[in-house]
């Protein structure tokens, strides 16, 4: 970290290009325009179900962890709403959801691999949920408009009805990150900060691979 830079600011700075690259990927661009077939959106939801099921299962291992437990909040969980959205999409497309991609299995494998390490699991937690609470909500509105879900089943995984103030929640999450007080002058703590950010980079990369597979399957 540079000067008085906080951990959350360093994360945002060092992962900004990852975020832009994934956000601008072909699958998401087409989804936002309504140009991705509904079959493709269903495939995306199937992949997200697998990812969130594993992330949330692993997160439930650490609710009482003295340093990281506060991050793993059940209010963030997406699995129930993804199940609702999958049913709605299967009804509209007239087919059951497809298979889990190899890229998704690789991502799930990494989540399982780091599940016992709350620092590394936090990297994936941060990438997914802070993204969901930021651009994800806006993406949900665009998808709703493009595919006419009337704000309900089909886009419910983009919504957080139990979080009254999303901005306040994100600010509290970032403050909690900063309170981890990883000191750049301490070799071990500096390594922890580096490992966290390296894993965030990996999380973005793994997510990008999933999105590329969705796009390729529905070119």
Image (cartoon, grey):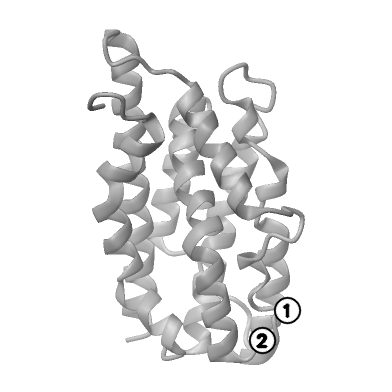
Q: Is residue 2 above or below residue 46?
A: above
Q: Quadrant of residue 81?
A: bottom right
Residue found at x 26% / y 63%: 21
Asked if one can make out residue 40 in the rendered structure from this viewpoint, the answer is: yes
Residue 56: x and y, percent?
A: 62, 44
> Looking at the image, do the residues carrying marks 1 and 2 touch, with CB atoms under 8 Å apart?
yes
Residue found at x 38% / y 63%: 210
Disc 1, SS: loop
Q: Is residue 156 above or below residue 168?
A: below
Residue 135: x and y, percent?
A: 47, 64
Badge number at residue 152: 1
Badge number at residue 149: 2
Label 1 Cα neighbours within 10 Å, binned few <14 / some 14-19 / many ≥20: some
Distance in Å between CA atoms under marks 1 and 2: 6 Å
Residue 218: x and y, percent?
A: 38, 84
Quadrant location of the N terminus in the rendered image: top left
Is residue 178 found left or right of 161 in the rendered image?
left
Nearer to me, 15 or 114: 15
Q: Is residue 112 above or below residue 99?
A: above
Is residue 203 found left or right of 159 in the rendered image?
left
Q: Quadrant of residue 164?
A: bottom right
Residue 148: x and y, percent?
A: 63, 91
Q: Residue furthest front?
A: 4
């Amino acid at each position: 970290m540079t000067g008085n830079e906080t951990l959350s600011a360093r994360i945002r700075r060092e992962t900004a290009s990852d975020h832009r690259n994934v956000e601008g990927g072909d699958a998401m661009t087409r989804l936002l325009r309504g140009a991705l077939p509904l079959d493709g959106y269903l495939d995306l939801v199937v992949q997200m179900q697998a990812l969130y099921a594993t992330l949330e299962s692993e997160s439930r291992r650490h609710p009482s962890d003295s340093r990281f437990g506060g991050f793993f909040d059940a209010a963030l969980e997406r699995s129930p709403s993804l199940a609702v959205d999958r049913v709605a999409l299967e009804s509209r497309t007239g087919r059951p959801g497809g298979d889990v991609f190899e890229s998704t299995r690789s991502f799930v494998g990494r989540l399982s691999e780091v599940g016992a390490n709350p620092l590394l699991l936090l990297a994936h937690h941060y990438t997914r949920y802070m993204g969901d609470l930021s651009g994800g909500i806006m993406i949900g509105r665009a998808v709703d408009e493009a595919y006419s879900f009337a704000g309900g089943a089909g886009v419910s995984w983009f919504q957080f009805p139990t979080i009254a103030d999303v901005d306040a929640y994100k600010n509290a999450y970032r403050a909690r990150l900063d309170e981890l007080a990883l000191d750049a002058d301490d070799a071990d703590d500096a390594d922890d900060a580096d490992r966290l950010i390296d894993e965030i980079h990996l999380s973005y990369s793994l997510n990008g691979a999933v999105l590329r597979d969705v796009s390729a399957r529905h070119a």
